[in-house]
Image (tube, rainbow, N blue to C red):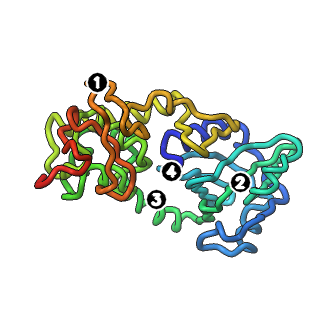
Amino acid sequence: MPELPEVETIVRDLAPRVSGRTIRHPRLHKSDVLRGVTRRTFLAGITGRRIDSLSRRAKHLIFLLDSGRRMVIQLRMTGSLLVKRGRLTAEQERYAVLTAPLGGRETLVFQDVRRLGTIHLLDEPAWGTYTARIGAEPLDPGFDAAQFTAVLRGSSQAVKKVIMDQQKLAGVGNIYANEALFRAGIDPSRRADRIAGPAAARLHAAVRAVLTEAIDARGTTVRDYRTGTGQRGGFQFSLDVYDRAGEPCVRCGTLLATTHAIDGRQTTFCWHCQGAEPSGGPRRGR
């Protein structure tokens, strides 16, 4: 699933191309992606509307329309978003969920092979409720180590689960949680409320550094992710632990271990550098 760096990359690619443009004769090819709005209401709500801006909140793309409403798209596992000039390719036609002509032979295309993505159309009060459920943005200048420590202090769950909880911290998913915990030298299964002081500061810095570097590399393409220009990201070549189970640690040479015991997802770590159990399971009693 695209995480914060991937969505931020898409926003930076597309914002200059869609801002100020008017949506003309949109077509919704698959209605099952809509959430909380009917097909008729959705199409009526975006037809003829100018896109005032495109921004990101957590893993969501936010199209602010001149009506004050927001079209919120979450790409999830196999979704992609781009501005296509000229006719769509056969593959784009096949997997198109939403096509929104912008004039000048350009079309905003949301395609999704497995149709796991979602679209909301929210007025101002609904948007306020929606965004209030999402946690702090880890790259906001004001989100300092003290605020991050407070997030950790509020949960006895494994720290990896906490930093991936979108109600606690926005936009961090499995790839970057693995990477940040490795950089900070912290066992992914360690209780979040037992991480404070220098350890919390290290993890705060690691989360911000990994996300920033991934944005600079235009995201991570392991399988489906493409940028807003249809290209692959580049951060997969800089991953230290994610998807590297059984390979040597880049720091100490110990073979990396993987467990699914923490949150049901792939957690890869170095038991030597991160102080976890060499069996690949979470450390007991922590």
* Nearer to us: label 3 or label 2: 2
Amino acid at circle 4: Lys
Total numbered labels placed on residues in the image: 4
Which residue is located at x 28 percent, y 24 percent? 251
Q: Which residue is mark 4?
A: 59
Front disc: 4 or 2? 2
Q: Earlier in the sequence, mark 3 or mark 2?
A: 2
Which amino acid is tagged 1?
Arg
Cα separation between marks 1 and 3: 39 Å
Q: How many residues crowd mark 3 within 10 Å: few (<14), some (14–19), many (20+)?
A: few
Question: Counting residues from the N terminus, which is met first, the one under dot 4 or under dot 2?
Answer: 4
**Label 3, label 2: how far apart the Cα atoms are:** 24 Å
- Residue 82 percent coordinates (x, y): 71, 44
Marks 4 and 3, Cα distance to the nearest angstrom? 12 Å
Label 1 vs 3, first from the N-terminus: 3
The residue to which callout 3 is attached is 131
What's the residue at 60%, 62% (across, down)? 116
Q: Which residue is mark 1?
A: 251
For the residues bearing labels 1 and 2, Cβ distance under 8 angstroms: no
131 relative position to 231: left or right: left
Q: Nearer the viewer, mark 1 or mark 2?
A: 1
The location of residue 277, given as percent across then percent down, is 19, 44
Give how far across and how far down residue 109 sits, in percent. 75, 50
